[in-house]
Image (cartoon, rainbow, N blue to C red):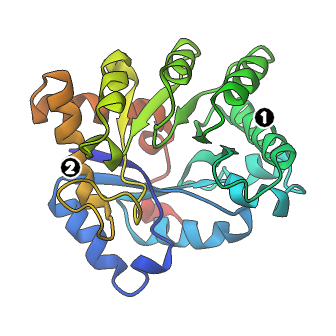
Amino acid sequence: MLIDTHCHLDFPDFTEALAEFVARAEAAGVGRMVTISTRVARFASYTAIAERFPSVWCSVGTHPHGAHEELDVTADQLVALSRHPRCVAIGEAGLDYHYDKSPRAAQAQGLRTHIAAARITQLPLVIHARQADEDMIAILREEMGKGAFPAILHCFTAGEALALAGVEMGLYVSFSGILTFKTSEELRRIARLVPRERLLVETDAPYLAPVPFRGKRNEPAYVVETARVLGETLGLSFDEIARITTENARRCYWKMDRATPLSQVA
């Protein structure tokens, strides 16, 4: 089994045939998927999907692109929403200096709010980091000093320094289809530096489809290709990398195995 630790099943790309995408993932051996929140205001749409499909779970949080739009969201509110039985993570939140769609101060404030919620709940914080390595390392180290919290560096494309700092702080590092691109040799080198017990795979669907689907709409079934390349990068068989990343994902998203069964969700 594989777990797609990060996708966006609420996006319009999946609206018309969501059941088909979920079924295709399950048929490919992707036994669990986590659809990730980008706006707290849309939390009900994520839980609706997670309640509909037993293999789908969700998170609660605000993407850095919209941080300035949800600065009124408090850590206590995130904690309260995260009690939903299908919610297994906080985020995604973080810093994106590539697009800068939200003021950087707002992104940092939002990130710290989400960190506080992750610290209280001990649910993993899903971190978005793009071209903000130094500031991200500084914030994470400062916040870890206030009290430990679990977290994932999602869709990792940053530099070695952030990867190693994250591992030092106990974070997981998740690789997407970008790992499969011919131009991603540096990323594959960094993947070799990450301890095996900290590796995760994801799609970030509908974006970043892996080779041989690059340029097409991504979907959870395609996480198989990313896992295959990650295994090749580390000199591991597909079955071994599937076992490792699945065990890691279950340990990271620990609530999956402790939550109320879907049949008992009101």
Q: Is residue 40 left or right of residue 217?
A: right
Q: Residues within 10 Å of mark 1 (few under 14, many from 20)?
A: many
What is the secondary structure assignment of the residue under circle 1?
helix
Tell whether label 1 touches label 2 (CB within 8 Å).
no
Q: How far across and how far down the image is residue 81, in percent?
A: 71, 55
Q: Residue at left 72%, top 53%?
A: 100
Q: Which residue is denoted by mark 2 in the rendering?
A: 224
Q: Is residue 182 left or right of residue 205?
A: left
Inspect the image, locate mark 2, and give the three-letter code of the amino acid beneath it: Val
Tag on residue 38? none
Q: How far across and how far down the image is residue 239, in percent?
A: 11, 34
Q: How far across and how far down the image is residue 265, in percent?
A: 52, 64
Q: Residue at left 29%, top 36%?
A: 246
What is the secondary structure assignment of the residue under circle 2?
helix
Q: Is residue 149 left or right of residue 246?
A: right
Q: Is residue 133 above or below residue 197?
A: below
Q: In this rendered view, identify the residue nearer to me: 115 or 168.
A: 168
Q: In this rendered view, identify the residue nearer to me: 242 or 44.
A: 242
Q: Which residue is denoted by mark 1 in the rendering?
A: 116
| Quarter assignment of residue 45 | bottom right
Tell us which disc is closer to us: 2 or 1.
Answer: 2
Q: Residues within 10 Å of mark 2 (few under 14, many from 20)?
A: many
Q: Is residue 110 above or below residue 160?
A: below
Inspect the image, locate mark 1, and give the three-letter code of the amino acid beneath it: Ala
Q: Residue at left 50%, top 16%?
A: 164
Q: Residue at left 47%, top 40%?
A: 258
Residue 62 in view in this figure: no
Q: In this rendered view, identify the residue nearer to me: 12 or 118.
A: 12
Residue 194 in view in this figure: yes
